[in-house]
Amino acid sequence: AQSVSQHNHHVILSEAASLELGCNYSYGGTVNLFWYVQYPGQHLQLLLKYFSGDPLVKGIKGFEAEFIKSKFSFNLRKPSVQWSDTAEYFCAVNPYGNNRLAFGKGNQVVVIP
Amino acid sequence: DTAVSQTPKYLVTQMGNDKSIKCEQNLGHDTMYWYKQDSKKFLKIMFSYNNKELIINETVPNRFSPKSPDKAHLNLHINSLELGDSAVYFCASSPRGTFEETQYFGPGTRLLVL
C-alpha cells in the first residue's frame, strides 16, 4: 500500500544539537510535500512545504527540508535546536490528483535544556 | 481571530451515545476536511467537503456522518459511539481543495469513549 514513513519516532536531543528527521513516501508521480508541527497542547501548524522549484525549502523557525526525488524523500533539518522545538513533527504527502493528505506517524522530539 | 476552530475541545462520553463535533473556518475557504488521529498519533483523512458537497469519503463506518450547512462549517456527528472511536479529531480547510494548496488545521477535539 502507498504510504508515508517516518522513522525514529522518539528523538531526544540537547539544546544546540542538530536535528534531522527522515520522511520517505511510496507514491509515484508528482507529489506535494509538507512538514507540520504540533506543539504540546496545540494544533497542527505548517512548518514548510514543497510544491515545485528549488528542492531545498526553508520554513519557519530555522527549519529546512530537502526533496530528493530519486530517493522519494523529504527530510527535515534544523542545525541547532532549542527547547521550544519540543513537539511532534509530521510529514505529509499530497499525491497529484488525489487531494488527500497522507501523513506519516510522526516524530516525537524532546529537546533537553 | 482563530482561523479554524472546533468545539468542544474535549468530549468524554459513554459507549452507545450519539455526539457531534463542530468546526468553523473564517478563512473564506471552499473546502473542509475531517481527520482522525488515533492513539498512536497516526492521522488519517475521513471526509472532505467542497462548497457543501461531499468530495472524499474514506472507508469510515456509517455511524460517522458529516454535515456541511454552509461552506464555513463542517460538523461531524457520530452515532452509537464505540470504544475504538476514542481519538483526536482534527478539522482542516483549504482554499479550493485543489492539488497545490496548504491545509490549515483546527486545534482538535479529544474524544474519549468510556
Image: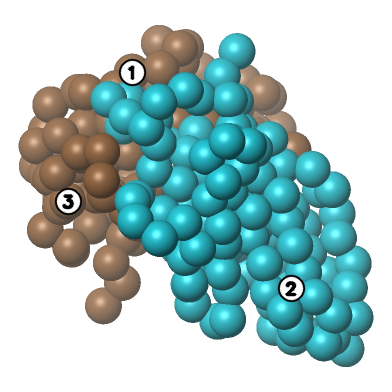
Q: Classify mark 3: residues with Cα within 10 Å, few (<14), some (14-19) or many (20+).
A: some
Q: Which chain is cyan?
A: A
Mark-to-mark CA distance, 3 and 1: 19 Å
> Which sits in the foreground, A102 or A95?
A95
Mark-to-mark CA distance, 2 and 1: 34 Å
Q: Chain of mark 2?
A: A
Mark 3: secondary structure: loop
In this view, the mark in front (2 or 1): 2
Whether discs 2 and 3 lie on one chain: the answer is no
Quadrant for residue A10, please give it: bottom right
Tell me residue B38's x, y (percent).
Answer: 65, 35
Quadrant for residue B32, please give it: top left
The type of residue carrying mark 2 is Thr
The type of residue carrying mark 1 is Asn
Residue named by callout 3: B95
**Quadrant of the image for the C terminus of chain A?**
bottom right
Q: Is residue B8 above or below residue A4?
A: below
> Which sits in the foreground, B29 or A13?
A13
**Quadrant of the image for the N terminus of chain A?**
top right
Q: Is residue B74 above or below residue A50?
A: above
Label drawn at residue A86: 2
Chain B, which colour?
brown
In this view, the mark in front (3 or 1): 3
> Which sits in the foreground, B106 or A52?
A52
Tell me residue A36's x, y (percent).
Answer: 53, 58
The type of residue carrying mark 3 is Pro
Which of the marked residues, 3 or 1, is nearer the chain's N terminus?
1
Residue named by callout 1: B57
Query: Which residue occupies 53% across, 50% down?
Result: A67
